[in-house]
Image (cartoon, helix red, strand yellow):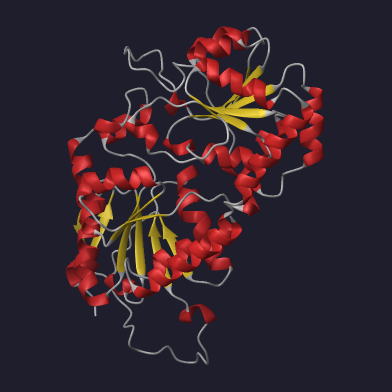
Amino acid sequence: MYNPNFSKKVLTHGIPSTVNLKHLNPNVPIKNIKQSPPEVNLPHFVNYYADLAGCGFWRIKWPEYLLNINNKAAVTSLAQMVFDGNWYKNIKTIKFQRQATTIQKRFLEDLVKLKKEFKYNLLYEIDDVVFGQDIPNYNHQKRAFTDPEINSNILSMMQSVDEITVTTPTLKEYYKEKTNHSKITIIPNYIPKFWAGRLYDNSHITSSFDKNKKRPRILYAGSATHIKPPSINSNEPDDFSHVIESIIRARKDFKFVFKGAYPYQLKPYIEAGEIEYHGWSPLLKLPTDLLDLNCNAVIAPLANNTFNKCKSNIKMLEAGALGLPGAYQDLDPYKDAPLKFQTGEELIDQLKLITKSHGNYIKHSQNSYKIASSMWLEDHISEHFDVYNSSWGSAERNKNLELIKNNLDQKI
């Protein structure tokens, strides 16, 4: 019941070799067991995730946790490949998150062959642009995706799976064009209530605003991938190029607070105490650490390029869960944001609008929380389950999608 060529491959530091593996015969019952554990009757899904940073949790680990703890499925996520073919016998769906190496491609090719026997679904999960030609030069992660072999591997894997899952409509269209794959499903990034949904406190929001009313605290929380390092000699604008001068000019009116990274042009003002900087936080502590900064609003500038158009609105969800309103770049990820800007001057105008009065500020704060609370992962976990548990275009999938749409329409 297993493919011997598939099952006898193992990896040693990335180099394929062959060993003799002993396998349990799945058709022989184990003695002295009176009953099966309840999870035996649940659908079984497997994830191969790409990282244990942010997107590994947003896209893989948090949905897995909710599906398991609610007894909806038995989901296993792995960082190492399992080469025993028997292991996949009762698996319904295998999902690959952002796999890219040649070894990973060969592994998927073997799973495609074994699929003929075990009839599972193969998914490829991707939440960002990963083809090097469309990643901006200022993004230091670009070097991981410029190798032609890596790009070829990704394309091959995406074309060989049954379905691709993405985060946004723009990203769907991007990969539809790049891969010519017609079965691409959007599962937005939903924020877990168990992670960030118990911190909203109107009294804290009110007192923080009153305390900082003369000079509101404005937060940017993001990684260095948005900022061009001094070592890159290029005229290509980064995500702050169009707003940096306006931020500098407005530093007396607003206390700008940068967490995680900051534009290098701001270093003198940080050293002088006119602008504030805090290092990054572990993901588990991020919501509480953001709250502890006592900021009043957030900003999310982006350069107008393909890579950024395909991003999602995570920054707006993280801020909204804390009741923090914000000014967001007028670009695809934030098309539904209440307050958007294109230029640095417009950014400052939006911040002035948010903070012009106590009543106005509370209105924007409550609206930001309302948006985030419509995107709790707990309320949308069925979307993840349906993609795992049914085939693209199947009657079961279409029925469930229609139910989801009706529920959303009723909320609106």
How many numbered dots are placed on residues in this image? 0
- Relative placement, left or right, of 248 versus 294 is left
Residue visible at 46% across and 50% down?
188
The quarter of the rendered structure image containing the N terminus is bottom left
Residue visible at 24% across and 70% down?
115
- Relative placement, left or right, of 65 versus 365 is left
| Foreground of the two, 253 or 355 | 355
Residue 2 position (above or below residue 318): below
Whole-percent x and y of residue 362?
Answer: 74, 35
Whole-percent x and y of residue 382?
Answer: 50, 65
Please say whether residue 120 is visible from this viewpoint.
yes
Residue visible at 53% across and 51% down?
190
The quarter of the rendered structure image containing the C terminus is bottom right
Residue 187 position (above or below residue 356): below
Residue 142 position (above or below residue 388): above
Whole-percent x and y of residue 313?
Answer: 50, 40
Whole-percent x and y of residue 124?
Answer: 32, 55
Please say whether residue 154 is visible from this viewpoint.
no
Residue 390 position (above or below residue 245): below
- Relative placement, left or right, of 33 versus 4 is right
| Foreground of the two, 56 or 78 | 56
